[in-house]
Image (spheres, helix red, strand yellow):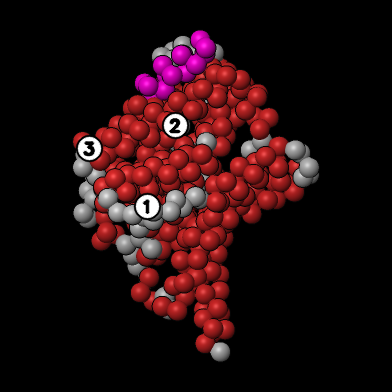
Amino acid sequence: MFQKENRNNTLSGILFVALFSTSAMYLSDFALFKHFGISPLIIGIVLGMIYANTLRTKLPKEWTPGILFSTKTILRVGIVLYGFRITFQNIEDVGTAGILTSVVVVGSTFIIGYVVGTKWLKLDKETTILTSAGSSICGAAAVLATEPVINAEPYKSAIAVSTVVVFGTLAMFLYPFLYKAGFIPFSPEQMGIFIGGTIHEVAHVVAAGNALGVEAAKTAVIVKMIRVMLLAPFLVILGFWLVRTTQSVTHKHKTNIAIPWFAVFFIVVAGFNSLNLVPLNLVADINALDTFLLTMAMSALGMETNASKFKNVGMKPIYLAGILFLWLIFGGFYIVKFSLMV
């Protein structure tokens, strides 16, 4: 009887989170949010954080497992289904330059972020990894996917996501301005590679690309999807690296490597999607469901984020994200130029 009651309370918590996700999806259709390229994922975490710091104490404690279920299990399902947004044919469409740009940007940005965050800014390891992952791969989705691999506290993910919002939005306006002002000597297609290879969120990439025309937008989205696809190998490599560094520091017995299977299934789903066996209208429905699930995960993440936890962090995550932002602009420019010559 207790187990049944517990299941009912957990379900109540999940449905409560789903209510926030529904609200975020509804708000994302407002013209203002569409204009600024603000996705329902971002709105969801903001709504969750507002709730966490106002009415959270009114939530029945028995519902908490439902919120935690949303931050973990629903999150993993959402990342797996994210594979339906990608096909391997996308990679072929942009050629060597798009692939090389994506790989070099992801690798270099994360390494620079980790070194600067931990060695120079003395930021904690988890916040550094999450912030660097968000900047280097695919924004909020990368932060969400990385959190369970490193067992980070929810508020650290919220901090990392906030940096994505700030600098991703800034990049969305800055790139088209710089290009139209003549500061970036690329063709529209090359500019698409630059945008897709260096801007944070998929929504930001779409907005910036569309501001420069159809050709730039198409290339930008494809290159961005290649970065998204790199999320899976990144998480696997991160898992191996964390185990090795932990062993070297603690000198304990060999630790089992926790492979993030949801990342592997993400690639499997992308491969299946590449076979074009699923009707496009059904894929669109799956992507809509996936957005809802990821928004649930973000909303639940926000609900677990109390403002008091931010006090000891200060401005360091913003400094780190700002440095990575500058690297993505200037370093990314030369990475694209190099890739075009290969």
Label ID, residue 161? none
Label ID, residue 119? 3
Q: Which of marks 2 and 1 is in front?
A: 1
Distance in Å between CA atoms under marks 2 and 1: 29 Å
Amino acid at the residue labelled 2: Val
Q: In which quadrant of the rendered view does residue 110 lie?
A: top left
> Where residue 58 appears, x then y in whole percent?
39, 76
Which residue is pictured at 45% across the width and 79% down the height? Answer: 62
Q: Mark 1 points at which residue?
A: 254
- Mark 3 / mark 1, whichever is N-terminal: 3
Mark yes or no: residue 331 visible: yes
In the depicted structure, whether residue 63 falls above or below residue 161:
below
- Mark 3 / mark 2, whichever is N-terminal: 2
Distance in Å between CA atoms under marks 3 and 2: 20 Å
Residue 339 among those drawn in magenta: yes
Q: Name the residue under label 2.
A: 106
Label 3: element kind: helix
Range of magenta residues:
329-342
In the depicted structure, whether residue 146 falls above or below residue 208:
below
Q: Nearer the viewer, residue 260 or 153?
A: 260
Q: Residues within 10 Å of mark 1 (few under 14, many from 20)?
A: few
